[in-house]
Image (tube, rainbow, N blue to C red):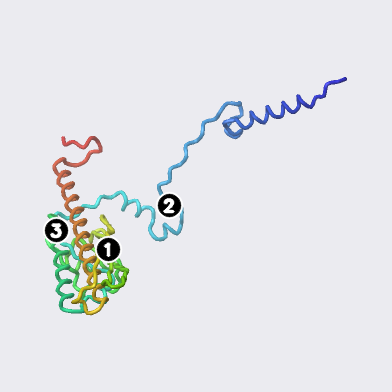
Amino acid sequence: MRNSPMPSLVFLILFVGGCSKGYPYSPAEWDASGTLAERAPAATLSDSLFKEDQAVMPNEELAKVLNSKVELPSRAKLIVVRFGRLPRWWGWSEDFVRVNEEIDSDFLGKLRSAGRLRDVAYLPTMVTPSSMTIPYLRQAAARCQADLILVYRTASFNYEKHRWFKAPRTKAYCTVEAVLVDTRTGVIPFSTVVSERFAATQAKKDFHFDETVARAEQQAIGKAWVRLAEETVAFLDRDSEQAAVGDQLGPYDGGAGSAN
């Protein structure tokens, strides 16, 4: 009886299949002589290949902005721009107006503590542009001879909790986002988002619970603005210290950074 060739054929198929799965390179990576060809290094993109991107800002201008260093003035004038509307309760009563003035005073006073700033003020409403875009804000700042613009927007939220036989409580959250704009270049060297909260319980002196909610929002806004000012001052002072160190070391030569 002759031996069947089927077991040998099956073994050969499995052996070839196992070797092909473990083959580390594709046939296209071998040259004509049968030796392994070196892979070409992948190209590094430095410019956008999308036409719609370049229609907004050409690659050359974008590269110039990214590769340039912005030096802020050592004694700068800062104008502050409030973006958006004030809360509806901003002028409810004399007490609210007084607290609002205190919040503004604390906010501007904290900004004035920056050693890099010689003057801080709100941008007057009569010169505030109707279109709140960076180009128009730069123009308004230039009219005021302001070197820097701090633009911020405030959003506040609250939720209420009522309990039987107890005074209603509310908790307010305030989020402030801000950008610091260099008037000369239009570059934004600093931006931040801060959030603060404040809880309040309806008091007997509150005419309505809406007044309790408004007071909680007012306190949360005040805390958020002061924190925004603190972070801005920290950035300006840190940038000022780095500039002073750079002046002592002399121009950077691309080496270890030591002065000659």
The answer to which quarter of the image holds residue 24 is: top right
Residue at mark 3: 117
Please state which amino acid type lies under the numbered disc 3: Leu
The x, y position of residue 100, in whole percent, is 18, 71
The x, y position of residue 248, in whole percent, is 13, 42
Query: Distance from label 2 to label 3 (Cα)?
Result: 38 Å
- 22 with respect to 55 (left or right): right
- Rendered residue at 43%/43% (across/down): 44
Badge 3, how many Cα within 10 Å: few under 14, some, many 20+?
A: many
Please state which amino acid type lies under the numbered disc 1: Val
Residue at mark 1: 176
Verify CB contact (< 8 Å) between mark 1 and mark 3.
no
Which type of secondary structure does the marked residue at label 2 adopt?
loop
Q: Is residue 35 above or below residue 235?
A: above
The x, y position of residue 94, in whole percent, is 15, 78
Closer to the chain start, of discs 2 and 3, is 2
Query: Distance from label 1 to label 2 (Cα)?
Result: 33 Å
Q: Which mark is residue 48?
A: 2
